[in-house]
Image (spheres, helix red, strand yellow):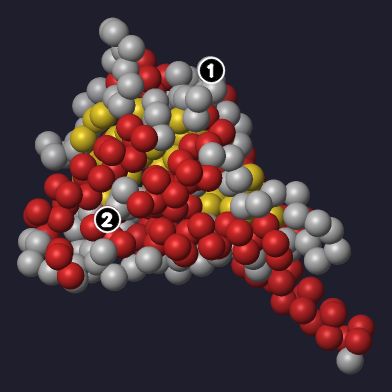
Amino acid sequence: MKLSRPEADIFLPHASPGLTPAAALARTTHLCVIAHQDDIEINAYPAVAECFGRAGKFFTGVVMTNGSGSARTGRYAQTTDAEMQIIRREEQRRAAEIGSYNLQLQLAHPSGDVKKPGHPGVAADLAAIFGGCGPALETVYLHQPADKHDTHVACFLRCLEAIRALPRERRPRRVLGVEGWRDLDWLADADKIPMDASPNPDLARELVAVFDSQIAGGKRYDLAALGRRVANATFFASHATDAATAVSFAMDLTPLVQNDTLSVREFTLAHIEKLRADVAGRLERFG
């Protein structure tokens, strides 16, 4: 396997003898392609949990950007941008070890390149990744198009372009968009995909805690990520007891993969229109 940038990282956390990165990618059952180090562990933990310790389930994580530009305070205040990129890369490797990932790829692209439609290096890497997955692939996890982080949205769009470039018979059967810098509680209940984040709570905590450079840098992702999952579980249904102790919501992006003519903008705005109609209807009924 060859990636476009020399600083890209290919890591097999628990490789059996003779296993190559290409073979690991080909056996992937759950693939998460996401923007930053720690995005997998914060936003796609249910995918990790579904594969952890289970025979025949293989989770592969892909981080598209190089980790530059993150906030630095406290003991990281004097850390240079180049040093922080190395720290974040090693934190992601450690998370892959703890979570028993099948394969961890860090593409090391600057965010600015990911934001450019048709960037040759980004396009080549994503073509190799999606094209290298085999028929075992069950679900792909991406950012969702209503996220408010520019790099998250750009990452999602580049992934969709790569998937749509595949022959239809090679495209993933199911694609989900995960929460990030905007949660998905606002989706109509019928459109929410609730993913159980309850299994292995110690693992969930340990995975987020790995990213000390971000937490000590002034953002309590460790508390916020777990708190969001608990809140989702409790506030999902008002007239039923909780079915899980932690839930992450996802948006079903599969229609965008199945229909090349479906506009991302119109697809996303249709979900927002459902929220508007729900609020307006309730106010009208009882007002």
Q: From this view, report whether residue 104 is shown above or below residue 269.
A: above
Left/right placement of residue 257 relative to residue 41 reads right
Question: Alpha-carbon neighbours of circle 1 within 10 Å: few (<14), some, or many (≥20)?
Answer: few
Q: From this view, report whether residue 212 is shown above or below residue 69.
A: above
**Where's residue 43, x and y in %?**
48, 52
> Residue furthest toward the front?
202
The residue positioned 42% from the left and 19% from the top of the image is: 26
Left/right placement of residue 58 relative to residue 3 reads right
The residue lying toward the viewer, choosing from 123 and 132, is: 132
Q: Quadrant of residue 279?
A: bottom right
Question: What residue is shown with label 2?
Answer: 212
Give me the disc on residue 97.
none
**Where's residue 39, x and y in %?**
39, 52
Q: Circle 1 — which element?
A: loop
Give me the disc on residue 56.
1
> Residue furthest toward the top?
18
